Amino acid sequence: MNVSLPTRTTGPRMRRARLVTGPRAPSEARGLVRDALRAWATPVDEDIAILLTSDMVTNAIRHTDGETITIGISATDRRLRVDVLGTTLADAPVDEDTGRGLVLVARFSDTWGFYRTPAGKAVYFTLANQ
């Protein structure tokens, strides 16, 4: 008897959205991450992914001089990655004492960091699949 088992998609899944900076952006970002995790059946802690996304988006809004930020969400069979890109002043250190240290992100993510972009800076975190 041949039995066919469902297979997981091994390629990366990605979403990207531009959000207007303002009080609704963190909620919109949380919804985007929640929807992606559920659509992709990504086995990570949804509450942690949403909390870290909210922290990064709030931080980006507080320190951007632009009208929008961009969120990128990607997942593989091994991990979830969320990037938040903004027009943050490129010379401001990501870990300065005004809340940019992203303590929650550092504490609860598997990896996190930042990189320069032509417009400023992006911050990301990853969560390994459970």
Image (cartoon, rainbow, N blue to C red):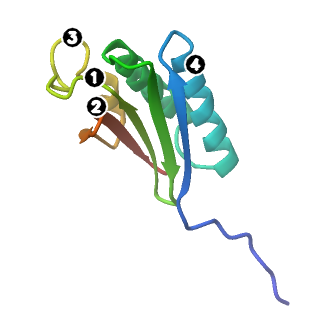
Q: CA distance from mark 4 to mark 1?
A: 20 Å
For this orientation, the residue located farthest to the right is: 1
| Mark 3 or 2, nearer chain start | 3
> Which residue was labeled with disc 2?
106
Report crowding for label 2: few under 14, some 14 to 19, many 20 or more residues within 10 A (C-alpha): some
Q: Amino acid at mark 3?
A: Thr
CA distance separating discs 4 and 2: 21 Å
Residue at the (46%, 58%) spot, across then down: 78
Residue sitting at 30 percent across and 30 percent down?
A: 107
Proximity of marks 3 and 2: CB atoms separated by less than 8 Å = no
Give the spatial CA distance, label 4 vs label 3.
22 Å
Q: Quadrant of residue 118?
A: top left
Q: In the image, which is nearer the foreground, mark 1 or mark 3? A: 3
- Give the mark, 4 or 3, whose residue is nearer the N terminus: 4
**Element carrying mark 3:** loop
Residue at image location 47% in from the left, 17% down from the top? 21
- Pointer 3 residue: 98
Q: Earlier in the sequence, mark 4 or mark 2?
A: 4
> Residue visible at 46% across and 33% down?
70
Q: Amino acid at mark 2?
A: Ala
**Residue 117 visible within the image:** yes
Q: Is residue 130 visible?
A: no
Residue tagged 4? 27
Residue topped by disc 1: 103
Residue 22, compared with residue 37, is above or below; it is: above
**Looking at the image, is mark 4 or mark 1 earlier in the sequence?**
4
Hey, what amino acid is under mark 4? Ser
- Asked if marks 1 and 2 touch (Cβ < 8 Å), the reply is yes
The picture places residue 84, in percent across and down from the top left corner, at 40, 33
Query: For the N terminus, which image quadrant?
Result: bottom right
